[in-house]
Image (cartoon, helix red, strand yellow):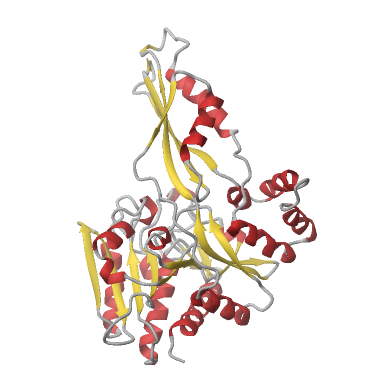
C-alpha cells in the first residue's frame, strides 16, 4: 500500500499505467499471469484470474475490483507528503489510503493468499484494478465493460462503497452498498452585457449568477425513502443511541416523519444525502480582467439523484426558485445511469452476513445506498450482483478524510480488513 500510494495517480491526468505495472510485478513474483489493457497513453486497467475449471462459467465468477486513480490534493493543507506513504502514530497517510488504493491492495492480498494456499475454488476469482473512477470512468470501467467484457465477465463483484463503522471503540454495524445515487453535473449560466467596470449595470452576469447560486444552495429536496434506505434506518435504529434510534423509527410514522427527517438530516450529512436528492454548487467561473464586466458567468451544480428519480422535475423546481430570465441550466455530458439494486438474498450477500457475524459479533449487516458514485453501477447494468464493502473498521472521522486533507488508514484496521475480506471470499469461492 505504501508503494502504491507513492505512485501519483491524481486524476486528471490519471497516469494509472505505472500503478498497474507495479501490481503486475507483484503478481509475476507469485507466478500469477496478468494482462494490462491500455485505453490511451498512460491509462488502462489490469486483470488477472484464478480459474476453477478449464471451462469458466462467467455467471458464477467473483470479480474483486478497486480503482487506481485518486483525487487531487492541496499539499499546503497536509501535515505529511500526500504521496509519501508516511506511517505515523499507527496510521498510514496518503492520498488513496482509503479511496481506493487500500481496497485495491486488500483485493491483491486476498488474491495472492488464495494462490499461495493452493485451495480448490468453486468459481473463478478475477482481480481488476482499473482507473478513471474519480472522473466518470470513461477511460476506466466504461472502457473495461464496453471493450473487454469477456476478460472481466462475472456474476458477482466486491467493490468499494460500503463501510465497517467504528463507534465508541467497537464496530457498530457493517454497511453493504447495494445501490447508489446517480450523479449529474449541471452548468448554471448567467448572461448579461459586457463593458467597462466603471459603468456598472444591473444585468451584471456575475451578480445574477451569485444570486442564483445563493438561492440554489438553500434548496432542500423533499424526503423520499426507498427499500434500501428503509432497511438501513430500520436496522441501524436498535444500535444507535436512544434519541437517534427513536427518530429513525419515527421515519415510518406518518405524523412524525417530517420532523424525524429534519432531525436526522441535521445529525449527519450522510443521512441527509440518503434521504433526498441533493444539489451542491461546486465551481464558479467568470471574468477575464478586474476592470471588465463579463457577458457570461458560469457555475457548476453537482447533483445526486435518488435511484429512479428524473432530473427534469428537479431542474424545473430550481428554475422556479431562481426566477431569473438571465439564468439558464445546461446538463453536462457524462451523466450517470440509474442501475438496479443488488439482491439481499444472493449467496454472496449471505456470505458477507455470515462472516461479519463471526468477525464482528453483535454488529448488524445493513444494506446501504451510496450517496456517491462507484464503478459498481455499470456492473449492475450487466446483471452483476455487485456489493460495496470497504472492509476496514473505520471511525466516522477517518471516513470523512476521503477526498479531504490528511487521508489516512489505521494499520490495525487495514490488516483486519484484509482478514475480513479473505474470509468472505473463502466462504463464497472455496469448494466445500
As rendered, which of 192 and 150 lies closer to the eye?
150
Picture coordinates of residue 31 (x, y %)?
A: 27, 85
Kindly indicate the quadrant of the structure image that contains residue 242: bottom right
Q: Is residue 397 left or right of residue 104?
A: right
Residue 425, placed above or below residue 37: below
Q: Residue placed at 31% from the left, 73% from the top?
A: 23
**Residue closest to the far top:** 199
Q: Residue at x 44, y 74 (%)?
A: 106
Quarter of the figure that contains the N terminus: bottom left
Q: Is residue 243 left or right of residue 181?
A: right
Q: Is residue 299 visible?
A: yes
Seen at 30% across and 81% down, the residue is 56
Q: Is residue 363 left or right of residue 5?
A: right
Q: Residue at x 77, y 47 (%)?
A: 256
Q: Position of residue 47 (x, y in %)?
A: 29, 72
Res. 22 in view: no
- The residue lying furthest to the left in this view is 41
In the rendered image, residue 62, in percent from the top left (x then y), is placed at 39, 76
The number of numbered discs placed on residues in the rendered structure image is: 0
Residue 178 in the image: above or below residue 27: above
Quarter holding residue 149: bottom left
Q: In the image, residue 182 lies at what x, y percent?
A: 46, 49
In this rendering, is residue 272 above or below 329?
A: below
Amino acid at each position: 500500500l505504501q508503494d502504491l500510494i507513492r505512485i501519483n495517480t491524481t486524476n486528471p491526468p490519471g497516469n494509472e499505467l505505472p500503478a498497474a505495472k507495479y501490481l503486475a510485478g507483484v503478481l509475476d513474483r507469485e507466478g500469477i499471469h496478468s494482462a494490462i489493457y491500455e485505453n490511451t497513453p498512460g491509462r488502462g486497467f489490469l486483470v488477472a484470474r484464478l480459474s476453477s475449471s478449464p471451462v469458466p462459467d462467467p455467471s458464477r465468477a467473483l470479480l474483486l475490483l478497486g480503482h487506481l486513480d485518486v483525487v487531487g490534493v492541496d499539499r499546503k493543507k497536509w501535515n505529511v507528503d500526500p504521496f509519501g506513504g508516511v506511517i505515523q502514530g499507527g496510521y498510514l497517510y496518503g492520498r488513496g489510503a482509503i479511496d481506493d488504493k487500500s481496497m485495491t491492495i486488500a483485493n491483491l492480498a486476498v488474491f495472492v493468499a488464495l494462490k499461495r494456499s493452493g485451495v480448490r475454488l468453486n468459481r473463478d476469482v478475477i482481480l481488476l484494478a482499473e482507473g478513471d473512477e474519480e472522473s466518470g470512468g470513461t477511460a476506466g470501467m466504461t472502457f473495461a465493460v464496453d471493450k473487454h467484457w469477456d476478460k472481466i465477465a462475472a456474476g458477482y463483484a466486491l467493490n468499494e462503497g460500503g463501510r465497517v463503522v467504528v463507534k465508541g471503540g467497537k464496530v457498530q454495524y457493517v454497511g453493504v452498498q447495494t445501490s447508489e445515487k446517480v450523479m449529474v453535473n449541471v452548468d448554471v449560466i448567467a448572461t448579461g452585457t459586457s463593458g467597462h467596470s466603471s459603468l456598472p449595470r444591473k444585468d451584471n452576469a456575475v451578480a445574477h449568477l451569485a444570486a442564483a447560486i445563493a438561492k440554489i444552495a438553500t434548496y432542500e429536496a423533499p424526503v423520499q425513502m426507498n427499500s434500501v434506505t428503509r432497511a438501513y434506518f430500520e436496522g441501524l435504529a436498535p444500535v444507535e443511541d436512544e434519541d437517534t434510534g427513536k427518530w429513525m423509527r419515527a421515519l415510518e410514522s406518518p405524523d412524525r416523519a417530517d420532523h424525524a427527517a429534519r432531525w436526522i438530516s441535521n445529525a449527519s450529512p450522510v443521512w441527509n444525502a440518503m434521504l433526498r436528492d441533493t444539489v451542491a454548487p461546486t465551481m464558479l467561473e467568470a471574468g477575464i480582467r478586474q476592470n471588465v464586466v463579463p457577458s457570461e458567468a458560469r457555475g457548476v451544480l453537482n447533483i445526486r439523484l435518488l435511484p429512479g428519480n428524473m432530473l427534469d422535475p428537479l431542474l424545473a423546481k430550481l428554475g422556479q426558485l431562481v426566477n431569473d430570465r438571465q439564468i439558464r441550466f445546461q446538463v453536462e455530458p457524462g451523466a450517470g445511469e440509474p442501475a438496479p439494486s443488488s439482491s439481499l438474498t444472493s449467496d454472496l450477500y449471505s456470505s458477507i452476513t455470515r462472516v461479519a457475524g463471526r468477525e464482528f459479533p453483535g454488529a448488524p449487516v445493513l444494506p446501504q445506498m451510496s450517496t456517491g458514485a462507484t464503478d459498481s453501477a455499470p456492473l449492475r447494468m450487466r446483471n452483476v450482483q455487485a456489493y460495496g464493502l470497504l472492509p476496514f473498521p473505520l471511525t466516522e472521522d477517518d471516513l470523512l478524510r476521503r477526498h479531504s486533507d490528511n487521508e489516512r488508514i489505521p494499520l490495525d484496521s487495514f490488516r483486519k480488513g484484509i482478514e475480513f475480506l479473505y474470509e468472505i471470499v473463502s466462504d463464497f469461492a472455496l469448494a466445500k
